[in-house]
Amino acid sequence: MDVGNPIYIFETNVGHGGTSIDNTGSDSAVVGVGTTFLDNIYIIHHVETSGTTGIITCLMASNPVGIATTTGTQTLGKFSWGKLGGISRSSSPVSIGVTGNTIDVGITTFPTIQRRGTGLRSTGALPKLL
């Protein structure tokens, strides 16, 4: 995970929806608008690791509601991220924007990228490591 990359946070249990913003810190630089807890698409602002523990910092618009400081080992949510690599592109690259959208029950309205004809049973899944 690198600073500037998007990350999807889901199955959270704090907050009341919120607006994520990009790394400029401007409330008008909206990445996504969440409607359920803190579930949303964010842009990674800072990554800090120590051994097997890490902290990912993302920015939200001013005055988020219902977020309290939590300590301990309580699970607050899950995350998913990905980065395409090891591919070549044609002379006409395709750009897919996902900023400024409302995040609701899922991200089914967002663009989907799929690998085909490779990996386990040609499903696009990564091959089994030997």
Image: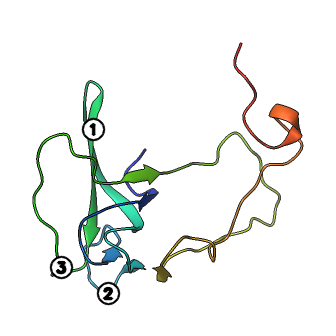
Please name the residue shown 39% across and 67% down the image: 39
Amino acid type of the residue that numbered disc 1 sits on in the rendered structure: Gly
Q: Nearer the viewer, mark 2 or mark 3?
A: 3
Q: Nearer the viewer, mark 1 or mark 2?
A: 1
The secondary structure type at the circle numbered 3 is loop
Depicted 63 relative to depicted 121: above or below: below
Q: How many marks?
A: 3
Task: Write down the residue under mark 1.
Answer: 54
Q: Quadrant of residue 33?
A: bottom left
Disc 1 to disc 2, how far (Cα)?
29 Å
Q: Nearer the viewer, mark 1 or mark 3?
A: 3
Horizontal relation, residue 114 to residue 80: left or right: right
x and y percent of residue 57 in the render? 26, 55
- The mark that comes first in sequence, 1 or 3, is 1
Q: Quadrant of residue 48?
A: top left
x and y percent of residue 122 in the render? 88, 39
Q: Residue 65 bears which disc, if any? A: 3
The secondary structure type at the circle numbered 1 is strand
x and y percent of residue 38 in the render? 32, 68
Please name the residue shown 80% across and 67% down the image: 92
Residue closest to the eye, 108 or 98: 108
Horizontal relation, residue 125 to residue 6: left or right: right
Q: Alpha-carbon neighbours of circle 3 within 10 Å: few (<14), some, or many (≥20)?
A: few
Residue closest to the eye, 73 or 113: 73
Task: Write down the residue under mark 2.
Answer: 28
Disc 1 to disc 3, how far (Cα)?
25 Å
Q: Alpha-carbon neighbours of circle 1 within 10 Å: few (<14), some, or many (≥20)?
A: few
